[in-house]
Image: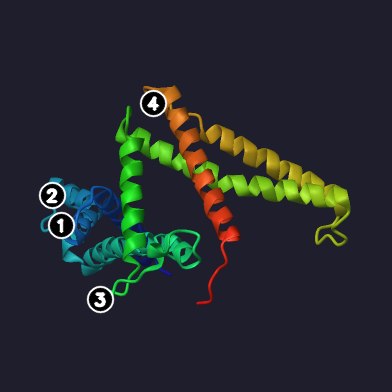
Amino acid sequence: MSVGVSFLILDLLGVAVFAVSGALAAIRARMDVFGVVVLGMTTALGGGVVRDVLLGITPPSTLRQWPYLLVAALVALSAVGGAAAYLAATSRLPFVAGLDRCLPAAFGSIHSRYRTPWVAILVYGLAGIVTAILGQAGTTVRGAYDVLVSMTIVTTFLPFLLLFAALIRLVRRGTITHYPLPGGAPIAVALAVIGFASTALTIVLSTIPSLEEANKPLAVAKVLLSSLAVILTGIAVFSIGRRRKIPDR
């Protein structure tokens, strides 16, 4: 591969990365598809255009070479599809819970025309809006984002604590008779202890607000209370599902 081709590939990769960042910023600002594509392309190509204009290179090279425009447009457009797919996929979790009667049966209803779980999508969207509004109470948009990230880390890593603790308990009981790793039970316990400690440390550190946060106690309270709310909701849904008989589909 020649040096010119290598530089072209690296340049296009840079364009793609900046296009994604611009498109995600537009999605967070709730722009439509056209706005997402325009902002993604502007973020990806704007710096190069300004550079060429200042150097007297007209028309700018990024506008004369079609691969740059094509990559920026396609990557920005793919960000729209990725965000839509993510939101649509996650909203099907309450839809399945409605089918299994872990949530009211209305969550499992399908729109007669569009064939989508509209109740689950609507409730999921409203819950996201409420969470965003409450997250910004007494802080900035960045502070609210930090709270959501910390809450996600806490609720995601808690199951791993249970996994590592379960491994230690099973080894101590002698339930496990075969170990895929050399060293047997002592190595398994040591790895589980390391995993448990590192996971617990990650959870604790995720609750610490950033230095820019003006009201640090409020930020910590938001993380802890929101995480507790998610955990209690999951326990409630699980308990309801165990008590109710799941009908045949």
Q: Amino acid at mark 3?
A: Arg
Q: Quick check: marks 1 and 3 in contact, CB under 8 Å?
A: no
Label number found at residue 53: 2
Where on the picture, by quarter, is residue 243? bottom right
- The mark nearer the N terminus, 1 or 3, is 1
Q: Quick check: marks 3 and 2 in contact, CB under 8 Å?
A: no
Counting other residues with Cα less than 10 Å from the Cα at mark 2, is it few (<14), some (14-19), or many (20 or more)?
few
Between the residue at mark 1 and the residue at mark 3, the CA separation in whole angstroms equals 48 Å
Between the residue at mark 1 and the residue at mark 4, the CA separation in whole angstroms equals 42 Å
Residue under pointer 3: 113
Using residue 92 as the reference point, say whether residue 232 is left or right of it: right
Residue under pointer 1: 60
Q: Quick check: marks 3 and 4 in contact, CB under 8 Å?
A: no
Residue under pointer 4: 213
Residue for point 32% across, 31% down: 137
Q: Position of residue 128 (x, y in %)?
A: 34, 48
The N terminus lies in which quarter of the figure?
bottom left
Using residue 228 as the reference point, say whether residue 56 is left or right of it: left
Camera-side mark, 3 or 2: 3
- The mark nearer the N terminus, 1 or 4, is 1
Between the residue at mark 3 and the residue at mark 2, the CA separation in whole angstroms equals 52 Å
Counting other residues with Cα less than 10 Å from the Cα at mark 1, is it few (<14), some (14-19), or many (20 or more)?
some
Camera-side mark, 3 or 4: 3
